[in-house]
Every structure is written in structure tokens, then in C-alpha cells.
Image (cartoon, rainbow, N blue to C red):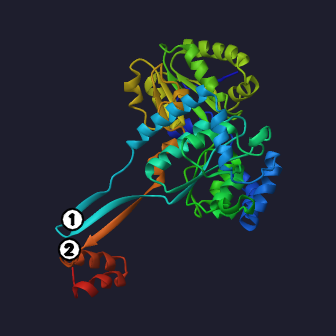
């Protein structure tokens, strides 16, 4: 099922590694052509288009696009007690971790009366997207909402697609567990819309007359949250009108392991990621052929027995999943840095020291008792992470994602006079004399 890529005794240059390592085919550019008319339709017709597109793609038409307060309350009432407690723990731990990320303003004094202050200001309004396709993701509600709240975002809204199987008071609305998670977090603005049209709805804003005075969705400044290729394409298309966190691709895990790793643990973790999507990537990097063989055998057994076996088998057999054999852990580290996994597990001797050498990963899970699924739910870390190798240059969702740094410059006349010759010199070097004159108009004629 899992292919083997043997990189032993092979040159491990960056270009060669990029060509050799497994990766899912994921063509956002082609999807742009599909989402462009959808986004244009939402721009032109607003709520009318959103109702029609929801019916077309999700097979159900809600009574109103905005989820009524009584439906949010009902979702909490019917929430399983164990799931509620788990969500509360997840929220509590995420708040604790994200609270420590909040930045403070800093002032640098360059003259007794010349300062530059970096002030951190939250985005005014954000749209948080929660997918609802093959699985239900209340954890994604937590991961989006908590950092936005900690950052101090004043206005936030959640969107999630309607579920055609919902019954009773929930008919036509997102999954009740999604709604319950929103309610537990204190989010009362929840919209029934999914896919590219949800991103467009947030970007352009709209008015749904059926929801009365609560039917206006004001445009947002930023959209965050994972989704399918059409969500990613809509983010790309509308970037600039809105800010985005990332263009999320298929989820992925890499496990860097040596002979000390338990093959049952490694196989279970590879399968847990493959459970998400047929395009999910599961990669084992190891210098132990014995571990590689054992993991391959356990994967065969476990994959056949798991609930979503068909999806798992397709993901593990795809071009994006493999066992990669390397000469030693140093070579393994070069491989995982080149792969830049969304999730990286390090299960080796002295795993903490090995993990400390990793440069490229969305999140790193250290040792045999830190599986990725811990981070998915209750570790306190955020599970909205960079995919497709973008962990080499981007970070996961955090409080910083919802903050903007603004430099505030305050110089006195004396402070300006001190540096005026340097401004003039650089302005003349760039042939922008008016830049210098904007200073000399205040200080008099200055020559360097």
C-alpha cells in the first residue's frame, strides 16, 4: 500500500529532494476558473445568490442564512455531555496557550525626543470558515475563534455549510456540534454558507432580508480557516480585497522515526491523517528498514479494519504518501526540512534534541506520547497549519494572525534636525529631491 522511496546513498540537495518527495496534486489555479463566476455572482446578487448556491452545492436551502439564536441554544442543549466537556477542555487549553502569544506595544527611543513605537492593533472584523464535508470539525471552530478573541477582534462571524441530513430545528443549518461549539465560545453570528460562496459572502458582505434586523453580514477584513480546493481558490481570487491566513491544501503528516519507534504507534498516526481525505499525505522517514517493514505491515492490517477504510487506503496508496528510507537521522532531518510538513512527529532516541534541529514544520510533536491527534483537539496548540511545503515560509494560525503592527513615529524639531542631512543625502541619491525638501521645509536648507 505505502510506496517506498529509497534515498540511501543518494545526494540530498534541495532540488533533488523536492523532486523525490511525495506530494499530492493540488491545482488551485484550475479551480480559480470554477470559483470566479461563483464569487462574481455573490458580489452581484448577494443573499439571493448564496441561497441558490447553497441549494446547488449542498442540496439544502435554509430558512435564513443567519443561524437564529434559538437554534444555537438548542445545539448546546442536545450536545453530548462527553463532547461538551471535551470542547470545554479544548477551549480552556487553547485560551491558555494563545493568551501567551499576545504581543505588547514597544517603543524605541532614538533621540531624547524622537521615538518609534510598534503598536499592535487587532483586525476590525474577521470571517472564520469551518468546513463541513466528509467530517464535522467543531475543533476548527475552537482553533479559529480563540486566537481571534485573544487578539481582541471586535467583530467576528463564523460560516459553515448546511447539512442536508439535519432534522427538526437544525434543518438547513450547519451541523449541531459546530453550532454548539460556536455557542460555547460566545459566538452568536453564524452564517449558513459553505465553499467559495462563503468566502465571497464574507468578502463582499450581503443583506438577507429573511433574517430581519440581524440579516446584514458586513464585509470582513480577513478570512481564516481551512477548506477544500474551492475555498482555497476563492481565497486566492479575493486576496487583496480581504486578507487571508493561507491557501490550505490537503492535510499531511511526516513521521521522523528510528528503530526505537513502536510500529503500531507510527502506523496508527499515518492512518489517522489519511482518514481526513483521499488526498491526505502520510509519510514515514526512517533509517531503519526493520521499522519500515513493520510499519508497512501494520498499516495494511489497520487500514483494512478502520471505519473509513476506503478513504484511508486511497490516501495511503496515493502519490502523496510513502515510506522514505535514509542513511541516518542527519539525512532524515534534511528530508523532513525539505518536505516542510504541516504536522511532523519525531519519534527517536533523544527526540527533543532531534526536534530542536528541525527548521521547517507547521507543528512538531515530540516523542512517542505526542501524536498529531493530540494537537488536533486538546494540546492547546493551533491545528490550522501551513500545508504543501509552505511551512518553510509560513506559520500556523495564531493570535498574530489577527493583529497588525503599526509603526507610530514621533520626532521633535531637534530630533528631525539631527537626521535631516541624512534624509537629504538619501533623497538625492534616489533622485527624489522633493523627499528631502519635505524635511528642509521644516528645518531650513540642509546639506550633507
Q: Would residue 167 appear left or right of 214 to someone viewing this image?
A: right
x, y percent for residue 203: 63, 61
Q: Where the C terminus falls, by quadrant? A: bottom left
Q: How many marks?
A: 2
Residue 137 seen: no
- Is residue 409 found left or right of 178 in the rendered image? left
Quarter occupied by residue 317: top right
**Res 411 seen here:** yes
- The CA distance from mark 2 to mark 1 is 8 Å
Decide: is 215 above or below 4. below
Residue indicated by mark 2: 415
Residue shown at 68% from the left, 59% from the top: 201
Q: Residue at x 70, y 39 (%)?
A: 175
Q: Nearer the viewer, residue 195 or 301?
A: 195
Q: Residues within 10 Å of mark 2 (few under 14, many from 20)?
A: some
| Closer-to-camera residue (341/18) | 341
> Which residue, given by chain and number where applicable, does mark 1 sit on?
110
The reply to whether the C-beta atoms of the residues labelled 2 and 1 are less than 8 Å apart is yes
Considering only vertical position in the picture, is 313 above or below 209? Answer: above
Q: Quadrant of the N terminus?
A: top right
Q: Position of residue 221 (x, y in %)?
A: 55, 60
Q: Quadrant of residue 291?
A: top right
Q: Residues within 10 Å of mark 1 (few under 14, many from 20)?
A: few
Q: Tag 2, which secondary structure? A: helix
From the viewer's perspective, tell me whether residue 295 is left or right of residue 426.
Answer: right
First reached walking from the N terminus: tag 2 or tag 1: 1
- Is 79 rendered above or below residue 141? above
Coordinates of residue 148 in the picture (x, y in percent): 49, 49
Amino acid at each position: 500500500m505505502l510506496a517506498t522511496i529509497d534515498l540511501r546513498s543518494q545526494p540530498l540537495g534541495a532540488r533533488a529532494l523536492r523532486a523525490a518527495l511525495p506530494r499530492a496534486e493540488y491545482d488551485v489555479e484550475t479551480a480559480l476558473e470554477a470559483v470566479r463566476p461563483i464569487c462574481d455572482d455573490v458580489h452581484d446578487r448577494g443573499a439571493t445568490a448564496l441561497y441558490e448556491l447553497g441549494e446547488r452545492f449542498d442540496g439544502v436551502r435554509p430558512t435564513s442564512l443567519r443561524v437564529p439564536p434559538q437554534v444555537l441554544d438548542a445545539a448546546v442543549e442536545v450536545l453530548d455531555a462527553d463532547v461538551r466537556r471535551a470542547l470545554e477542555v479544548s477551549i480552556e487549553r487553547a485560551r491558555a496557550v494563545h493568551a501567551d502569544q499576545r504581543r505588547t506595544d514597544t517603543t524605541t527611543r532614538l533621540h531624547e525626543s524622537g521615538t518609534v513605537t510598534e503598536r499592535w492593533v487587532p483586525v476590525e472584523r474577521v470571517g472564520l470558515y469551518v468546513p463541513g464535508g466528509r467530517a464535522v470539525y467543531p475543533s476548527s471552530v475552537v482553533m479559529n475563534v480563540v486566537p481571534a478573541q485573544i487578539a481582541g477582534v471586535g467583530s467576528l462571524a463564523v460560516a459553515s455549510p448546511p447539512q442536508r441530513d439535519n432534522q427538526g430545528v437544525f434543518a438547513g443549518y450547519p451541523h449541531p456540534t459546530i453550532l454548539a461549539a460556536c455557542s460555547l465560545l460566545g459566538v452568536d453570528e453564524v452564517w449558513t454558507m459553505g465553499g467559495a460562496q462563503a468566502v465571497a459572502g464574507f468578502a463582499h458582505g450581503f443583506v438577507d432580508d429573511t433574517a430581519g434586523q440581524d440579516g446584514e453580514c458586513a464585509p470582513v477584513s480577513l478570512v481564516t480557516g481551512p477548506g477544500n480546493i474551492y475555498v482555497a481558490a476563492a481565497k486566492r481570487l479575493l486576496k487583496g480585497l480581504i486578507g487571508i491566513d493561507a491557501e490550505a491544501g490537503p492535510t499531511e503528516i511526516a513521521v521522523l522515526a528510528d528503530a526505537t519507534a513502536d510500529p503500531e504507534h507510527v502506523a496508527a498516526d499515518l492512518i489517522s491523517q489519511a482518514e481526513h481525505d483521499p488526498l491526505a499525505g502520510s509519510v514515514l522517514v526512517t533509517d531503519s528498514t526493520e521499522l519500515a517493514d513493520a510499519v508497512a505491515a501494520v498499516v495494511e492490517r489497520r487500514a483494512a479494519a478502520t471505519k473509513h477504510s476506503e478513504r484511508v487506503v486511497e490516501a495511503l496508496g496515493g502519490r502523496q504518501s510513502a515510506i522514505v528510507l535514509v542513511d541516518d537521522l542527519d539525512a532524515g532531518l534534511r528530508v523532513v526540512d525539505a518536505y516542510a510538513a504541516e504536522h511532523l512527529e519525531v519519534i527517536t532516541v533523544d527526540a527533543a534534541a532531534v526536534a530542536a534541529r528541525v527548521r521547517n514544520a507547521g507543528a512538531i510533536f515530540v516523542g512517542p506520547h505526542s501524536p498529531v491527534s493530540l494537537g488536533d483537539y486538546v494540546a492547546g496548540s493551533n491545528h490550522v497549519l501551513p500545508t504543501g511545503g509552505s511551512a518553510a515560509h509560513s506559520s500556523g494560525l495564531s493570535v498574530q494572525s489577527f493583529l497588525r503592527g503599526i509603526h507610530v513615529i514621533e520626532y521633535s524639531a531637534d530630533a528631525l534636525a539631527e537626521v535631516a542631512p541624512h534624509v537629504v543625502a538619501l533623497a538625492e541619491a534616489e533622485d527624489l529631491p522633493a523627499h528631502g525638501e519635505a524635511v528642509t521645509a521644516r528645518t531650513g536648507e540642509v546639506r550633507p
